[in-house]
Image: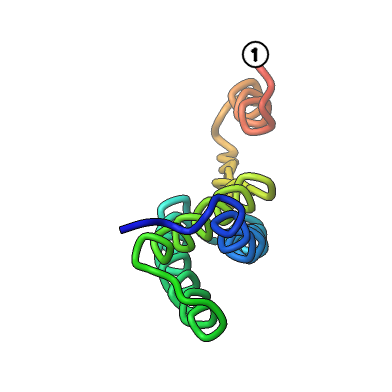
Amino acid sequence: MQLAPTLDLALLGLPGILLGMLLGYVFGGVETLRARDRLSLGIISSFVGGMILSLIIVVYHEIQTMEMIFIILSFFGGYLLGVFSNWTPTYQPRAASHIIYDPEDEDAEFDRQIKEALGGSE
């Protein structure tokens, strides 16, 4: 089993890298997705996208199994580049702090609760 020459192999991987970077850039910017979801989307989309690219390339150029694996891996590599270039942290809603005023409490205790809720120190 012999692989294609180096330049031909690099040209086979180039569309996968570019499309993977585009897809990774889009998924990396979605802050509602967790890191685990982004990684699993990357694995699935890299496999599916790499297979589609391989099937498109088969029409014009005969490729072997190792070259198909290379296309899938180049798609995943491009995806990782895109995700890390546009990574946004997952949205974490802030916990709302509530102050309950009890008229029987002392004013000093109420003031302490206000300072604590606003992030100040005593």
Is residue 92 at all visible to an observer of this figure? Answer: no
Is residue 100 at all visible to an observer of this figure? Answer: yes
Residue ID at (55%, 34%): 104
**Above or below: residue 73 compared with residue 56:** above
Left or right of 5 in this view: 14: right
Name the element at disc 1.
loop
Residue bearing mark 1: 122
- Pointer 1: residues within 10 angstroms few (<14), some, or many (20+)? few
Q: Residue furthest bottom?
A: 59
* Residue 93 coordinates in the image, percent (x, y): 57, 51
Quarter of the figure with the N terminus: bottom left
Residue 10 location, quadrant: bottom right
61 or 38, nearer to the observer: 61
- What amino acid does circle 1 point to? Glu
17 or 62, nearer to the observer: 62
13 or 115, nearer to the observer: 13
Residue ID at (64%, 48%): 88
Residue ID at (66%, 58%): 25
* Residue 111 coordinates in the image, percent (x, y): 67, 26
Quarter of the figure with the C terminus: top right
Left or right of 83 in this view: 49: left
**Above or below: residue 115 compared with residue 121:** below
